[in-house]
Image (spheres, rainbow, N blue to C red):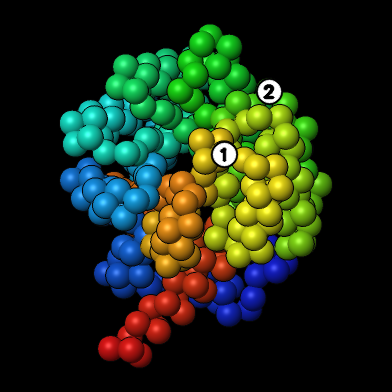
Amino acid sequence: MRFHPSVSLLDRAIVRLLPAVPKPVVRRLSFRYIAGPSLDDAIRVVERLNGKGKLATVDVLGEEITSPDEARASAGQYHDVLARIDEAGLDANVSVKLTGLGLELDQDLCRENLESVVRDAAARGNFVRIDMEDSSLTDRTLELYRELRVEGHANVGVVLQAYLRRTISDLEGIENARLCKGIYVEPPELAYQEFEAVRASFIRCLEQLVAQGTYVGIATHDEDLIGEALRIIDEVGLTRGRYEFQMLLGVRPDRADELVTDGHRLRVYVPYGQHWYEYSLRRLQENPKLAGYVAADTVGRALRR
């Protein structure tokens, strides 16, 4: 297991211990950050978020598929999500990982599954965000996104990871992007390793996306980057309909409330599914700082009680 150089020794220790932690404990640690195992759980969370003036993106956990039937079943779950969002009149869209739709099995199969979800969303006046995974999949992910946009599917966007050195050159022609730092461990020749270098890349990418008229989801919990984003929004005079902030469920909800109060669109990423345990371990292992944050938050809650 490799770690980013800026990760503290305490965070690394927490991550290394995670596989030995009893499953019920991991459940308690993670369920503030996951809606629950069922679609009903996700819908309840989205209803609560909408009630506070926040938007949502629903993600079905479990991209580790091994057969075409599993990939089609995964696409079917997204059709179920879109139907429930529509029926409940919720302000939410969906986020898909292409590996969950079969990208590593057969690109044509993945394309078929993805397009079916995008068409369903369009028929319901909804939107699909294509998530970004590790760098080995970046070219294929962008290729599928661009193909769908060229074919007239305006209700699809993609995720861009600022820590990848290539990202600044990937921005041209992107109409709708979610910009985040990135969480996968990548080698120095592919990704910036220094914390400030990643921040600087994020700002450069955000400035270019805004300048070229891209609708951008500013996905960060980093207060410095939130401040820089607010500066760019103010300097350019960016209207509310051209951007939104995005955060993970359970992370900095008070700051999210402040952004909503100040008149900004704020979307919360809402993962759910039976594969919550695998997601929890992977998410915390990929982002040791989040593991430290969760542990500190949990200890703080226990002490307050």
Q: How many marks?
A: 2
Q: What crowding class fits label 2: few (fewer than 14 Cα within 10 Å), some (14-19), or many (20 or more)?
A: few
Q: Earlier in the sequence, mark 2 or mark 1?
A: 2
**Residue 1 versus residue 237: which sits nearer the camera?**
237
Q: How far across and down, in percent of the image, does residue 265 sit?
A: 46, 46
Quadrant in the rendering for residue 211: top right
Q: What's the amino acid at mark 1?
A: Thr
Nearest the viewer among 184 and 179 is 179
Residue 213 point in image, percent of width and height = 66, 30
Horizontally, residue 29 falls left or right of residue 207, namely: left
Q: In which image quadrant can residue 143 be found?
A: top right
89 in relation to 113, above or below: below
Q: Residue at x 56, y 23 (%)?
A: 145
- The residue at 24%/30% (across/down) is 86
Reply above or below: 60 against 145: below
Which residue corresponds to the image point at 38% horizontal and 78% vertical from the top-left?
A: 298
Quadrant in which the N terminus appears: bottom right
87 in relation to 258, above or below: above
The residue tagged 2 is: 173
Residue in the image at 43% along x and 55% along y: 260
- The answer to whether one can see residue 295 in this image is yes
Residue that mark 1 sits on:
239
| Camera sees residue 116 | no
Q: Position of residue 270 (x, y in %)?
A: 36, 49
Q: Which quadrant would the C terminus be assigned to in this image?
A: bottom left
